[in-house]
Amino acid sequence: MEETTITMSEMATSISDLNISINNVWVLVAAFLVMFMQPGFAMVEAGFTRSKNTANILMKNLMDFAIGSLVFWVIGYTIMYGDSILGLIGKPSLFFNDNGIGDYANTTDLMFQTVFAATAATIVSGAMAERTKFNAYIMFSIVVTLIIYPISGHWKWGGGWLDQLGFLDFAGSTIVHSVGGWVGLMGAVVLGPRIGKFVKGKPKAIPGHNLALGALGVFILWFGWFGFNPGSQLGAAGPENTIAIGHIALTTNLSAAAGAVAAMFVAWMRYKRPSLSLSLNGALAGLVAITAGCDIVSPGGAVIIGTLAGIVLVFSVEFIDQVLKVDDPVGAVSVHGVGGALGTILVGVFATDGGLLYGGGFKLLGVQVLGVLAVGAWALLTGFILFKILKATNGLRVSKRIEEEGLDVYEHGENAYNM
C-alpha cells in the first residue's frame, strides 16, 4: 500500500475547512431555533387575548415570518449590512445572492439575520392585537422589515455610527426588541384602546382566553433564546467560541429565571397574588434585558439584570395601563421596549470590560444611554409617521361590529375554535 503524506499546509487547510463547516452548521441551527420562536410569540399573543381573535393572531405571526423573509432577502439585508453610507445606512442592492464564504457561508448569514428581522416585526403584533385591520398589518410589517429595522440595525451591526462609538448590543436588546416595542407603542397609541378597556377613564382587565397557551409560548421562547443569544457568537469552532457559547447560554438562562422570580414576588406583594401572566412576562423581560450583554456580564451580573427587569416589568405594565392609558394586550411594550432599553443601559454598569462597576467609569454607560435614546427616537418617530399615514389612507382599525364579534370570521372567514 502506498503511504499518503499530508503536508502541514494541507493539514492547516483541512482544519480551516472543518472550522468553517462547524461554524456554518452552528449558525444555521441557531437560526432554526430563533425561527421556532415565531410559534412561541404566536402562542403568547393568542393565549393572552380572546378566543374570537385567535385565527387573526396566528395569521399575523405567520405572515410576519413569510413576508419578512421575502422582503429582507429582496433588499432589507443589504440596507442593514451593505457598505456603510455615512454610518447611517447600508448601500442597498436587490435580491441577495452571494455564495461567498467567510467564517461561514454568506447565505447562512442572510438566513440568521432574517429570523431576527422577523422577530422585530412580530413584537409589534402583540401591542396592537384584537383591533387592527389585517391589510394594514401587512403593510406596516413590510415597512418594519424593509426600512425601520434595517436602518437602525445598520447603526450597530452594519458598522454604522453607533458601532463606531463603541455601543454594545450583542444580540439585540435594543436593535431588535426595543425597536419592535417602541413601534408597537406608537401603533397602540394611534390605534387607540380596545372597546371596553377603559371605563370612565379607569382601565378594566380583559383576560386572555388561555393562559396554558401563553405559558407554552413563553417556554418555547425561552428555549429559542438559546439560539438567539448563543447563536449570535456566530461561530462554534475552537476553544474561544466554546467558552463564549457556554457563558452566553448560562447568563441567558439565569437572567430569565431571575426575571420570572422577581416579577412573581413583586406581583405577590403588590396584588396579593403570585400572578402567572406577570411571572411569564417577567421571564421574557429577563431574556430581553440580558440579550445586549449576555457575552460580557458575569453570571451574578446576569441575575441582577434579570431581577431588575422582572421588577421593572410589573411597574411598567401598570404605568402604561393606568397612567399612559395605552392598551397593550400582551405587555409587549413593557417586555421588549422597556426591558430592552433597561438591559442595554445596564451593560454600561455590569460589563466586566468597561462597565461602571468594573472600573470603566461612565464612558460606556454614556454610549449605551445614547444608543438607547437614538434607536428609541428613530423607532418612535418612524412608527408614529407610519401609523398616521396608514390611518389616514387605508385605515388602521376594524369597525366596532368586527371588533366586538371577533376578527376571525370577518377578517379571515374562519374560527380557530369550532365548537
Image (cartoon, rainbow, N blue to C red):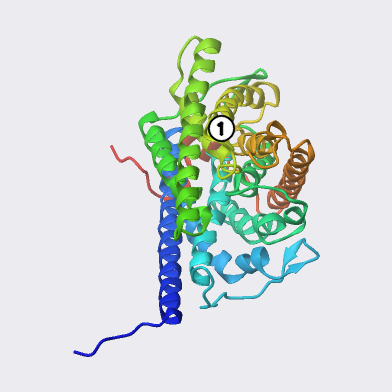
> Which residue is situated farthest in the right direction here?
86
Rendered image quadrant of residue 368: top right
Percent position of residue 57, x then y: 46, 44
Residue depicted at x 37% and y 36%: 216
Vertical placement of residue 280 versus 274, above or below: below
Q: Tell me the element at label 1.
A: loop
| Residue nearer the viewer, 324 or 170 | 170
Q: Residues within 10 Å of mark 1 (few under 14, many from 20)?
A: many
| Residue nearer the viewer, 364 or 291 | 364
Residue position marked by numbered label 1 in the rendering: 331
Residue depicted at x 56% and y 32%: 331
Percent position of residue 206, x then y: 51, 25
| Residue nearer the viewer, 38 or 84 | 84
Vertical placement of residue 277 versus 287, above or below: above
Percent position of residue 317, x then y: 60, 26
How many marks overall?
1
| Amino acid found under the numbered disc labelled 1 | Gly
Asked if residue 231 shows in the view, the reply is yes
In the image: residue 140, left or right of residue 385? left
Percent position of residue 199, x then y: 62, 19
Q: In which quadrant of the rendered image does the C terminus lie?
A: top left
